[in-house]
Image: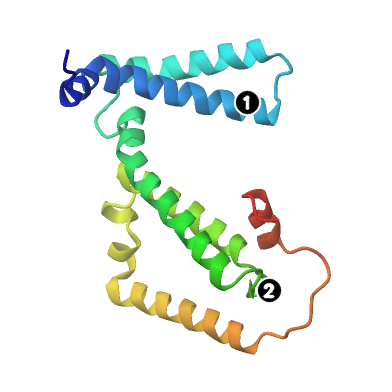
Amino acid sequence: MVYDFNRALTLLDTPIIMDFFLPFFLLFAVLFAVLEKIKMFKEKKVNIILSLIIALLTVIPHTTGRYPPGKDVVEIMMNSIPAVAAVVIAIIMLFILLGLFFGEQKFAGASISGWISILCIAAVVYIFGASAGWWSGWYSITNYLGQDVVSLIIIIVVFGLIINFITKSDKPEPGEKFMDKLGGFFGKK
């Protein structure tokens, strides 16, 4: 008997799988992991039930079409996941390159991993905001300030970081910096 891989993928690409089961299991797994990590409830059963209820309350209105246009949580999530996956892969590659070439270097008084963590958070917020349509219309900073002003702000920030990198002292400062703590939270110690 010959199995057709394309036919199997076509069977998986059905509305019940793509619009209900995959978002449900993703939401359930993430919510359960977060509840287990923060230990809000001591009982594992409570975490399971709460994750199950929240995931169902999110996915069922999507499946029945009860969300208003542009406010569907599952659509926003499904549109954002491929871009977030690309950012995660890019960040992993960046960490590999930084580890090869820079090691434990500091930038602006903090570890490079702390700065990358901030950039990752900003990128994920931007991706989800773009999927939700937050950056269009009058919310867009480019529409509000103009393209020239936004370009000028980016140039000033980049030159400020370069000047800070060049003129910083090599003396170690006491205490752990916020950026180092943030980098440590994301795995770099």
Q: Is residue 132 visible?
A: no
For the point 43% across and 26% down, the residue is 26
Task: Judge whether 108 appears above or below 80 on screen.
Answer: below
The N terminus sits in image quarter: top left
Q: Is residue 27 left or right of residue 82?
A: right
The residue beneath circle 2 is: 109
The C terminus sits in image quarter: bottom right
User: For the residues marked 2 and 1, what is the alpha-carbon distance in whole angstroms?
Assistant: 34 Å
Q: Residues within 10 Å of mark 1 (few under 14, many from 20)?
A: some
Is disc 2 placed on a helix, strand or loop?
loop
The residue beneath circle 1 is: 35
Of the pair 9 and 181, the residue shown nearer to us = 9
Residue at the extreme right: 174
User: Residue 108 at x, y = what percent?
Assistant: 63, 75
For the point 35% across and 14% down, the residue is 60
Is disc 1 placed on a helix, strand or loop?
helix
User: Residue 107 at x, y = what percent?
Assistant: 62, 74
Q: Is residue 91 visible?
A: yes
Going by the numbered disc 1, the residue's amino acid type is Leu
Task: Judge whether 148 appears above or below 58 on screen.
Answer: below
Q: Quadrant of residue 14?
A: top left
Q: Quadrant of residue 111?
A: bottom right
Q: Quadrant of residue 64?
A: top left
For the point 82% across and 65% down, the residue is 175
Going by the numbered disc 2, the residue's amino acid type is Gly
- State the mark number for residue 150: none
Q: How is the image coloured?
A: rainbow
Q: Is residue 6 left or right of residue 176?
A: left
User: Residue 46 at x, y = what percent?
Assistant: 64, 12
Q: Is residue 114 left or right of residue 91?
A: right
Task: Judge whether 85 appears above or below 54 on screen.
Answer: below
